[in-house]
Image (tube, grey):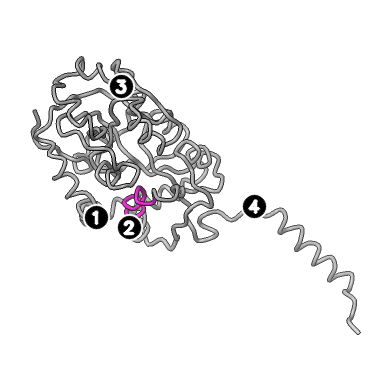
Amino acid sequence: MPRTLSQAAWRWLCGLLLASLLTPPLQADDSGTLRYPRRADGDEFRSLYALAQLQLALDKAGSSLRLEPSHYSMEQERALVNLEHNDRLDVAWSMTSVEREQRLLPVRIPLDKGLFGWRIALLPKDRAQLLKDVRNLEQLRQFSAGQGHDWPDSEILRDYGLPVRVSSSYGSLFRMLQAQRFDYFPRSVIEVWDELEHPRAKQLAVDPHVLLHYPTAMYFFFSRKRPELAETVRIGMEKAIADGSFERLFQQHFAASLQRARLDQRQLIELHNPLLPNATPLQRRELWFTAPPVR
């Protein structure tokens, strides 16, 4: 016949249950995982480079944290809101802005070496020569650009009087372009070629004529409640830069894309970025891409 628990044992068991209810959820350093935003199905390719650099940084820092996607896919702003509140997300990466650096904790080492500010356009195939005669900003203003509603790029373009049409969904921008809801879709030179291979871009082409440039950076961001995570990744990235492994990984992913973009054969249109934080490390030349002379 089973023995009944003693009064002392009941007190111990009740105390254990109460403690489990009061204990906060496991965070990245407790659970051994670092949670990042899951991409929508079919868009996983957009995270491959950032995840490779993040894993490299963790390895260089001697961290045992394991990368794990969020349970659900997230558009950019949803991911940043979750991160800001330290809610089921530990890290995200995006283009920086003054507003984002106020909300979140950046690691100020540009993953993209600034190349998210070097933009060439996606166009419908039957309008592939649309920008052939564009030589300056005034001529570019004749055409409308498509952008995400919460992307810093939208404000940068509008600051120069460039017409912008926006969407809350990344995928819908491709459909809007094909339907000519706007004229061109400026994309980073290091993302446009992979996007072109996606089935949703089968009726699109890359413009061969114009190159937009504004200074910016894509950073890893962390919650301001988790500075230790940011510091771990910063230390690892600095080590990767120092031993050359950051650059080797960058070239492995993007050397062919940069060659294919033929930057030196394009008409360059320079824009100022009013959203660029003063703390951007522009003085560290080793962190930035150096473009060949362009027209």
Q: Is residue 216 visible?
A: yes
Report the residue marked by disc 4.
Answer: 24
Q: Is residue 228 visible?
A: no
**Chief secondary structure of the magenta portion:** helix
The residue furthest front is 126
Which numbered disc, 1 or 3, marks the residue that appears first in the sequence? 3
Report the residue marked by disc 2.
Answer: 56
Relative height, residue 216 to residue 140 (above, below) = below
Which percent across, then down, holds residue 234? 35, 49
The span from disc 2 to disc 3 (Cα, nearest Å) is 39 Å
Task: Please identify, in this view, whether the residue under mark 2 or under mark 3 is nearer the observer.
Answer: 3
Which percent across, then down, holds residue 216? 29, 33
Question: Which amino acid, by three-letter code, is at mark 1?
Answer: Leu
Relative height, residue 206 to residue 34 (above, below) = above
The span from disc 1 to disc 2 (Cα, nearest Å) is 9 Å
Question: Which amino acid, by three-letter code, is at mark 3?
Answer: Ser
Which percent across, then down, holds residue 282? 24, 34
Report the residue marked by disc 3.
Answer: 144
Q: Relative to residue 258, is residue 40 drawn left or right?
A: right
Q: What range of the chain is rendered magenta?
A: 44-53
Point out the image quarter for the N terminus: bottom right
Report the residue marked by disc 1.
Answer: 249
Q: Dot 1, how many residues are within 10 Å of its Cα: few (below 14), some (14-19), or many (20+)? A: some
Question: Which amino acid, by three-letter code, is at mark 2?
Answer: Leu
Q: Quadrant of residue 2?
A: bottom right
